[in-house]
Image (spheres, rainbow, N blue to C red):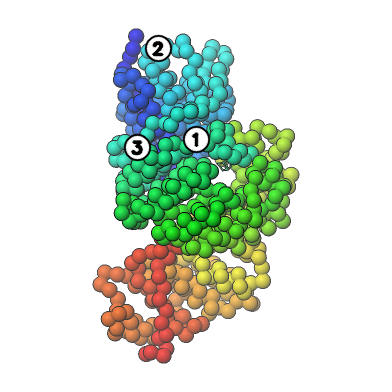
């Protein structure tokens, strides 16, 4: 007998601004493959909101089946959420899918009696087939990717990998729910590489969807009110010709069919960029695209051990070339805790990466994900890691627990000082004047800041900490340091009000303001906030009108003028 089925597809996003595409892909699968007696809706939540509220939203839909997309960041909260729901809806069928449960389905089913099914691999077709089977109460057939309990046993299926293009998730309901948040676009699945710490290599060879569909969806997303379209393709330029066609499509349509201000984010491999692509990218409008380029390490032995085949010299050269154009935000990353990467080797990798001067240098820590070869081959990768998500490595034969903890202090300082973009001039000055490497500087200050405690520190207090710490350094001129910090602050903080530690009461400030206002070209515009400060090391003043930010540096433009001579 066929029964009507009410289905909720849910996921807990890491933040409100991130809206996982997975539930919408599953919904598209249901619409394409399910019988008409099955109706489904998406209910999103975040890991930071009260779980009872998410549970209430789900329960209010009276679902007979709930599917959850599970990731490393939400699995713990998803388990709690299931408990809350099952307390009120004990007969609801719970189905889990996603990377966090795809390769450990037996354990998930053994440890969570409230979970009825796990779907391993791609979900669009398997979830729809499972719902059809539930509605017909017919489990005669084996379903792709379906893992379940059968009496005392657990039946596990291999991860399902489709050969077709998945149905498009972009419906009016998706756009309505997006509400200006970051949108995600998938134009391929899988990855041609197989890095030992990553799951993507297990999802089959890269499968590229129809390029005309990719362009169509790219335009849809660009015009839906979002500011950032994030391509989730694992190595977007794995197919160079196709990648160039899409880059070219964006460049040609930017400002016309693609509204100015929208930014497309790509994950690419830097060493396979060729001259043609680099030349093409140099013509991209400022801020139209941003790239995330994985480095992981500059130690060849480390890279080889995790199965990464990277031409490091070419990678370095290409990153420098794309950064030189200053038209794209470039994000590169390193991973601490990889095999053969000891303290000295990591320091070396960090210093090389820093000298490339990306817009963002992310220092991540190795995580041993379920299904990743590194986790499944402990003899080859003898690491200690936390048993709870995010399974971060805490010690390896090459790097100690203590050293990894110190690297967390480096990460904190790097995030706040470098990646925030709030201290560009200050850092240039410090690097010039202090006799230390970038790694030593971030380590030294990171350790100090951690002693001080930075968890809830305000920006003004952090600025005070930096100023006080470095201004007693014998090779640093206190006034030069203050002026660099003033310029950084004015360029990145639209309040226009200097933190007390950088403020100097001076009657010349008023005169400088009067001087600017006396000329119609420099007079403060109505409705536009202005920041103004005197720079004593250069004998000049600087002002900034808080109108438009540079989309790559995220800075407002500073304008200096010689007030001493002209007043
Ligand atoms: S780390 Fe990147 S290149 Fe390596 S397998 Fe994963 S997605 Fe592919």
- Tell me the mark number nearer the camera, choosing from 1 and 3: 1
Q: Is residue 39 above or below residue 151?
A: below
Residue at x 69%, y 44% (from the top left corner): 304
Which class describes the residues within 10 Å of circle 2: few (<14), some (14-19), or many (20+)?
Answer: few
Percent x, y of residue 114: 48, 23
- Residue at 67%, 46% in the rendered image: 303
In the displayed image of the protein, which residue is found farthest to the left? 526
Q: Which mark is residue 170?
A: 3
Q: Are marks 2 and 3 in contact (CB under 8 Å)?
A: no
Can you say whether 440 is above or below 170 in the image? below
Which residue in the structure is indicated by mark 2? 137
Tell me how far mark 2 sits from mark 3, CA to CA: 31 Å
Label 1 or label 2, whichever comes before in sequence order: 2
Callout 1–callout 2 Cβ contact below 8 Å? no
Mark 1 neighbour density, 10 Å: few (under 14) some (14–19) many (20 or more):
some
Look at 47% across and 59% down and name the residue there.
282
- Looking at marks 2 and 3 on the same chain, the residue that comes earlier in the sequence is marked by 2
Front-most of residues 322 and 48? 322
The answer to whether marks 1 and 3 mark residues whose Cβ atoms lie closer than 8 Å is: no
Q: Which residue is mark 1?
A: 207
Instruction: Answer yes or no: is residue 458 visible.
Output: no
Q: Earlier in the sequence, mark 1 or mark 3?
A: 3
On the image, the x and y values in percent for residue 205 come to 55, 34
> For residue 481, what is the image quadrant?
bottom right
Toward the viewer: 291 or 197?
Answer: 291
Q: Position of residue 277 (x, y in %)?
A: 50, 53
Q: Nearer the viewer, residue 549 or 316?
A: 316
How many badges with numbers are in the image?
3
Residue 327 seen: yes
């Amino acid at each position: 007998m066929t029964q009507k089925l009410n289905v909720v597809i849910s996921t807990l996003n890491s933040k409100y601004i991130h809206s996982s595409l997975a539930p919408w892909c599953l919904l598209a699968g249901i619409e394409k493959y399910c019988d008409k007696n099955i109706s489904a809706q998406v209910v999103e939540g975040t890991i930071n909101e009260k779980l009872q509220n998410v549970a209430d939203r789900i329960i209010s839909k009276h679902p007979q089946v709930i599917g959850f997309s599970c990731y490393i960041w939400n699995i713990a909260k998803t388990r709690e959420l299931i408990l809350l729901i099952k307390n009120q809806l004990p007969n609801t069928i719970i189905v889990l899918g996603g990377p966090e449960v795809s390769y450990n389905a037996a354990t998930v089913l053994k440890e969570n009696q409230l979970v009825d099914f796990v779907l391993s691999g791609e979900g669009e077709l398997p979830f729809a087939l499972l719902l059809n089977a539930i509605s017909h109460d017919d489990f005669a057939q084996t379903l792709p990717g379906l893992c379940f309990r059968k009496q005392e046993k657990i039946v596990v299926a291999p991860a399902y990998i489709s050969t077709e293009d998945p149905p498009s998730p972009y419906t009016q309901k998706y756009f309505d729910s997006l509400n200006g948040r970051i949108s995600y676009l998938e134009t391929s699945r899988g990855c041609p590489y197989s890095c030992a710490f990553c799951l993507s290599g297990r999802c089959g060879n890269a499968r590229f969807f129809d390029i005309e569909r990719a362009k169509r969806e790219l335009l849809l997303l660009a015009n839906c009110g979002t500011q950032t379209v994030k391509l989730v393709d694992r190595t977007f330029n794995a197919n160079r010709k196709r990648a160039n066609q899409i880059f070219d499509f964006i460049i040609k349509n930017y400002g016309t069919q693609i509204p100015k201000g929208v930014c497309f984010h790509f994950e690419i491999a830097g060493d396979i960029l060729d001259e043609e692509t680099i030349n093409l990218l140099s013509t991209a409008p400022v801020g139209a695209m941003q790239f995330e380029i994985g480095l992981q390490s500059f130690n060849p032995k480390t890279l080889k051990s995790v199965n990464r085949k990277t031409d490091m010299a070419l990678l370095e050269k290409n990153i420098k070339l794309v950064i030189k154009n200053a038209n794209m935000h470039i994000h590169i990353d390193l991973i601490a805790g990889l095999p053969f990467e000891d303290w000295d080797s990591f320091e070396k990798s960090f210093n090389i990466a820093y000298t490339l001067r990306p817009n963002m240098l992310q220092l991540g820590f190795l995580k041993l994900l379920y299904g990743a070869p590194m986790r499944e081959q402990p003899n080859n990768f003898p690491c200690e890691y936390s048993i709870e998500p995010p399974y971060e490595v805490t010690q390896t034969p090459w790097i100690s627990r203590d050293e990894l903890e110190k690297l967390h202090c480096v990460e904190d300082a790097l995030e706040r000082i470098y990646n925030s973009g709030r201290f560009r001039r200050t850092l240039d000055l410090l690097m010039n004047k202090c006799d230390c490497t970038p790694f030593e500087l971030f380590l030294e200050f990171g350790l100090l800041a951690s002693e001080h405690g930075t968890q809830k520190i305000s920006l003004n207090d952090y600025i005070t900490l930096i100023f006080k710490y470095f201004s007693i350094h014998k090779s640093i001129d206190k006034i030069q340091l203050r002026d660099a910090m003033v310029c950084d602050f004015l360029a990145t903080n639209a309040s226009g009000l200097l933190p007390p530690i950088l403020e100097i009461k001076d009657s010349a400030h008023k005169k400088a303001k009067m001087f600017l206002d006396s000329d119609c070209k420099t007079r403060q515009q109505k409705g536009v906030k202005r920041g103004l400060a005197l720079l004593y090391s250069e004998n000049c003043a600087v002002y900034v009108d808080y109108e438009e930010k540079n989309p790559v540096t995220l800075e407002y433009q500073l304008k200096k003028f010689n007030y001493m001579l002209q007043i």
